[in-house]
Image (cartoon, rainbow, N blue to C red):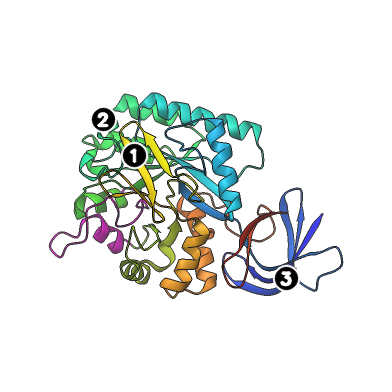
Amino acid sequence: MKKIFAHRLFTGEQVLEQQIVTCQNGMVNSVEAGKPASDTLVVANLAAGFFDIQVNGGEKFHFTANPDVDCLVDIEQACLKNGTAYVLPTLITSSLSNVFKGIDAVRHYLDEHDASAIVGMHLEGPFINPKKRGAHLAKYIQKPDRKAVEEIISHGKGIIVQMTIAPEMFDDPDILQLLIDSGIALSVGHTNATYQQASDAFDRGIHQVTHLFNAMSPFMHREPGVVGAAFDHQNVFTPLVLDGKHVDFAAARVAYKLKRDRFFLISDALFLGMKKQRFQWEEFDARLIQNEYLNSEGNLAGATISLADAVRNAVEKLGVGIQEAVEMATSRPAKAVQQQHLGKVEAGYPARFTTFSNSLDDFHVLIG
């Protein structure tokens, strides 16, 4: 049994002062007010483990380029080092054989690691719109057909937690319904859908967009696009890359004011730690220039922030309270991807936490 005393405890729903969290067998056993004893670990701030649902690479390896166990080890270690306790390694548009290789790697990794930071994976593509492909390679974008969709659902069962799709690319509504009914948390992204097309997808049961504003039809006064549809549908989650580069902080503030408890944070990091200087995967290239990953054309090729950086930016740039910023990295992403067993500190939840300093410049993962 392990006891942790937190001067401030962020439960996922409220902030409690002077709390003792008792952990046993990897789970929270109790939470109660008290004072630390000699055998109690003392921390300033304790929250549920931060959960990043979109990370492309660790410090060395990129999951799409290296869909193997070595890459998963790298991603997990890099996330833990940056205060992220849970993660969905993200595999972007590539061949189906590469997708299946990534699925197999995650399944093998989870079989070997019971208490891993890796929850499953996020498949971003290949059924996206080439007009909004961003850094995704056009040659691997596929028109969705029943055979490919059924193979992905079957092969990815229990492993693919989230999948990004462009709903307008599904000519057959029954094929889209296959994915909706599969149990995978679907997200609308890399899409040029009209407001109506996006609204239809949300009405059918898709409740999230992928990196709000980026790689989607914008809000226009005569055609509100995917952004407008996301704003107009109260139940749609809108994760955002809060680095000031992918989205201006002013636009992020507007989105937060509109979406409130459906607004949360992701890193979408190409690599974590800014140690990787150059990257090349087939025609996809990136260089780290002044803390930005840029491709050979000078365009953004991926984020460099961690989820902890995004939490700090939410407080400093959006004017969000610390409690809500923490929920943007814990309970909200957990709910968005149907992992409600994560994201809170209370009896019966995992004893896997993120601790941080009052100044928000020091984040660590703590396992009870």
Q: Hey, what amino acid is under mark 3?
A: Gln
At x 29% / y 30%, what residue is drawn?
140
Nearer to us of marks 3 and 2 is 2
Crowding at label 2, few (<14), some or many (≥20) Cα neighbours within 10 Å?
few
Residue placed most toward the observer, 351 or 89: 89
Task: Check the image and name the residue furthest to the right.
Answer: 38
Evaluate whether residue 328 shows in this view: no
Contact (CB < 8 A) between labels 1 and 2? no
Q: Which residue is mark 2?
A: 139
**Distance CA(mark 3)–CA(mark 2):** 54 Å
Q: Position of residue 301 (x, y in %)?
A: 34, 47
**Residue matched to label 1:** 285
Task: Please say whether residue 325 is visible from this viewpoint.
Answer: yes
Mark 3 or mark 1, which is nearer the start of the sequence?
3
- How much space separates mark 1 and mark 3, taking CA atoms? 48 Å
- Amino acid under disc 1: Asp
Taking the spot 44% from the left edge, 53% from the top edge, the residue there is 304
Badge 1: residue crowd in 10 Å (few <14, some 14–19, many ≥20) = some
Query: Which numbered disc, 3 or 2, marks the residue that appears first in the sequence?
Result: 3
User: Is 98 in the magenta?
Assistant: no
Q: Nearer the viewer, residue 208 or 307?
A: 307
Which residue is disc 3 drawn over? 19
Quarter of the image holding residue 135? top left
**Eyeballing the image, is 129 above or below 155?**
below
Closest to the observer, 257 or 365: 365
Secondary element type, mark 2:
helix
Image: 325 above or below 270: below
- Magenta residue check for 230: yes
